[in-house]
Amino acid sequence: MFDSLSLKLEKAFQTLKGQGRITELNVANTVKEIRKALIDADVNYKVAKEVTDEIRQKAMGQNVLTAISPGQLLTKITNDELTRLMGGESEDIQIEGNPSVILIAGLQGSGKTTFSGKLANYLKRQGRQVLLTACDIYRPAAIEQLKVLGQQTGVEVYSEPENKNAISIAKAAIEHAKKNNFRVVIVDTAGRLAVDEEMMTEISRLKETLKPAETLFVVDSMTGQDAVNTAKAFNDRLNFDGVVLTKLDGDTRGGAALSIRRVVDKPIKFVSSGEKMEALDRFYPDRMAGRILGMGDVVSLVEKAQETFSAEEAARLQKKLRKNQFDFNDFLSQLDQIKKMGNMKDLLGMVPGVGKAIKDVDIDDNSFKPIEAIIRSMTAQERENSDIINSSRKNRIAKGSGTSVQQVNQLLKQFGEMKKMMKTMNKMGGGKRALSALNPFGR
């Protein structure tokens, strides 16, 4: 999402390249470019001015150490200010009461219903018993959508399609939750194409009646500054507890994420991208600032890996690799795990220095499909021992997978080279250290 902003900030810091000290002139020029970059990214002008004034003031108050350059110093100060702008500290969702009620609000098309399903999945993975409640009484498709999401995540959905009273439905859902030991009730409410009095009255009455532990406002990041204005209108009336930014994988300038905390004085609690139910992350201002400035986000990458890969699976894989017994069954299993972690380009963007390198590269998540098709077209014996795959077997695998013999050969060659590398590392004694890095659980 922040590719354009990241590039412009990088250019701003380049104005200090080769300069040995901080001066009023070079700071002024750099800060001017930073402010322009923020405004171009659709950050509120007043917010952009406040942030850059802070950067200039802090830069002029510091001496550059011999170990760092003026550009590095400005990058550090900008990183700190962006972190502060987006809230400083991460704030988790509040789960209180029995059951704990979470009220979801937002405009139609903001990704509200999809987020409700993702949040249910997020809480379920924490071991909580969750009930989804369909309270969008105006859009029948929303009820069906929530039911589909419930099936995908294994979460029950409470709905009364014939009932046109959202408060009545929500109260009945809470009673159902109490009787059936659900600890969390997520209430998906109706949205409109624009803020109107009827909508505000309904959501206000729902909040007053249900007394939720948490009221979350879902906003589409792609709507830019309009997202900030809508959030302010909702907060003035609803006084919500936190913000959820959706569609962060879209083609957007990202200003909403940077402005919204300062304008409504409410924390961003979650960020969401893509349609996968796992594509929901707790918001960390410092990590987001690091990604904007091209520093990556290794911590989030490791956390995603820890959520996806079980300790048992990692230990099993280590054992097979040490004995040089890694086969195509293991390889296929690892591909499945990686796909669960989220959008591939987003994952690579968390690696320091990689985000900038791949900003113009189209990385299709479907690129794994030919590899999977080839492996799935192999017999059990071929997967366990790829050395037996001769010409006739290659022809059969290519036809069965809808690929070419050349693609099959390429995969076999790459797989063979990987196994040789691991075998060499084990002989040299470096395999154990390398393998321990693959297992974030068993250190």
Image (cartoon, rainbow, N blue to C red):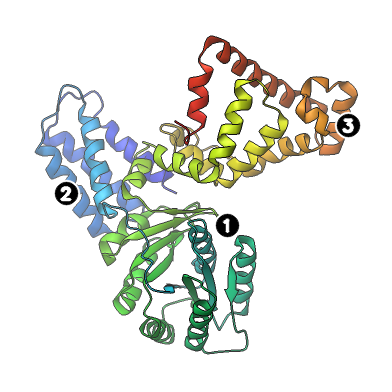
Q: Quadrant of the C terminus?
A: top left
Q: Image check: 104 left or right of 374?
A: left
Name the disc covering residue 275, or none: 1
Which of label 2 and label 3 is nearer to you?
3
**Depth check, front residue: 401 or 233:** 401
- Give the CA distance from mark 2 to mark 1: 39 Å
The type of residue carrying mark 2 is Asp
Q: Is residue 177 visible to us here?
A: yes
Q: Is residue 359 visible to us here?
A: no
**Depth check, front residue: 243 or 171:** 171
Name the disc covering residue 27, or none: none
Q: Image check: 19 left or right of 112?
A: left
- Where residue 66 sits, quadrant-wise, is top left
Q: Image check: 359 left or right of 286?
A: right
> What is the x, y in percent for residue 278?
54, 53
Secondary structure beneath dot 1 equals loop
- Label 2 sits on residue: 53
- Residue 163, relative to residue 421: is it above or below? below
Mark with earlier residue (3, 1) = 1
Residue found 26% across the figure and 27% down from its top: 17
- Label 3 sits on residue: 396
Mark with earlier residue (2, 1) = 2
- Where residue 162 sits, quadrant-wise, is bottom right
**Depth check, front residue: 24 or 84:** 84
Label pair 3/1, CB-CB below 8 angstroms: no
Q: Residues within 10 Å of mark 3 (few under 14, many from 20)?
A: few
> What is the x, y in percent for residue 319?
60, 26
